[in-house]
Image (spheres, rainbow, N blue to C red):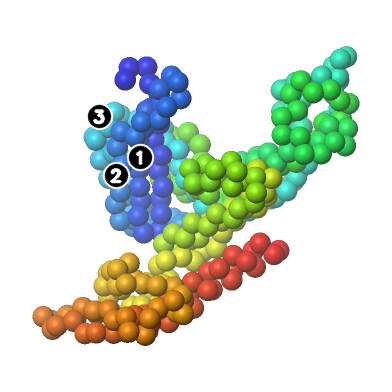
Amino acid sequence: MAGDKMLMGLDIGSSRTRCVIGSVSRDGQLMVDSICEHSSEGVRCGSIVNIEQTLKTIQTVINEAELQAGAEMTEVIIGIGGEHVVGIPSTGVVGINSKDQEIKREDIFRSLEVARAFELPQDREILHTLVQDFQIDGQMGIKDPIDMLGHRLESRVLIVTASSAICQNERKCIQRSGLSVQRMVLQSVADSEVVLSSEEKEMGTILINIGSGITNMIAYSNGAPIYTGGVNLGGEAVTNDIAYILNKTRAAAELIKCESGHSYVPSVSNEDMILIPQVGGLPPIKMPKKELSKVIEPRMAEIFSRLQSELEK
């Protein structure tokens, strides 16, 4: 509708590049106008390794999304994730200078600026400042301190940082496609806004998103993010294992994984059989489903073991 704000999001994944365009109405409702995706080229483990190939994919998917939406966009929001993204806990303390000792929005902004004022390596940049809670004169667990009274305000935050080189490569691709980057958003933060309820965040939840080349993770407790990170390992590694063990192409292995894969061996019956397609017009052969699970389970166990190690650091 006329007057609605148009937004475009882009996810440059290891296997697929996806673009979505939506319109936000004046009352805050989002309407999706188009969704397009293409196979990714020039991307490995969520990072760009060939700018020219990635640029071609980005231009293709954006052009198709714009055509479907009937709109020409000028800027894009990029999702980002992977092992290079790290959450750093920090605090910011400020004094309340107003005569009535009432905390204003400006005081919150000052405390967040203090929390961000630490020495950051030159190869890192800040993506988000995620607020956990506030303290007023030692009183902990305050979610919204505006209009409360106090002398000392302390903010507890999670500073999400990322590799500057990886971010700059994605910006360069976007700029060469004729657009500007509106902002970069951590994929796990966006995931949690869609998947997790307020109650789940409050009671404590870990959200894991297993992609093709990377697995992202974010942990919530008391309604706030307490950890974010990921590992450069995902479903593509499982596909490669199946392709190697069964001597199949990656495309065939991916199909077998998606149609018949199971990651927990004990839950698979010994009687369950699957059909493995053959080449050259030969008929498919039968294989116990449990044998396929024995290929998948170790790699999935490795992914979760590495995630657990990250959480325990």
- Give the secondary structure at mark 2: strand
The image shows residue 87, relative to residue 66, as above or below, that is below
Q: Give the residue type that dot 2 points to.
A: Cys
CA gap, disc 1 and disc 2: 7 Å
Counting from the top left corner in percent of width and height, residue 140 is at 81, 39
Of callouts 3 and 2, which one flags the residue occurring earlier in the amino acid sequence?
2
Residues at discs 1 and 2 in contact (Cβ within 8 Å): yes
Of callouts 3 and 1, which one flags the residue occurring earlier in the amino acid sequence?
1
Q: Kindly identify the residue that appears in the image at 48 percent across and 43 percent down.
A: 194
Crowding at mark 3 (Cα within 10 Å: few <14, some 14-19, many 20+): few
Q: Kindly identify the residue that appears in the image at 49 percent across and 78 percent down.
A: 298
Say the numbered circle drawn on residue 250: none
Say the numbered circle drawn on residue 20: 1
Q: Kindly identify the residue that appears in the image at 86 percent across and 19 percent down.
A: 101
Counting from the top left corner in percent of width and height, residue 283 is at 14, 83
Tell whether 240 sits left or right of 155.
Answer: left
CA gap, disc 3 and disc 1: 13 Å
Q: Residue furthest left?
A: 281
- Give the secondary structure at mark 1: strand
Q: Kindly identify the residue that appears in the image at 72 percent across and 34 percent down.
A: 143
Q: Give the residue type that dot 3 points to.
A: Gly
Crowding at mark 2 (Cα within 10 Å: few <14, some 14-19, many 20+): some
Say the numbered circle drawn on residue 70: 3
> Which residue lies under the disc numbered 2?
36
Counting from the top left corner in percent of width and height, residue 219 is at 62, 53
Counting from the top left corner in percent of width and height, residue 216 is at 53, 56
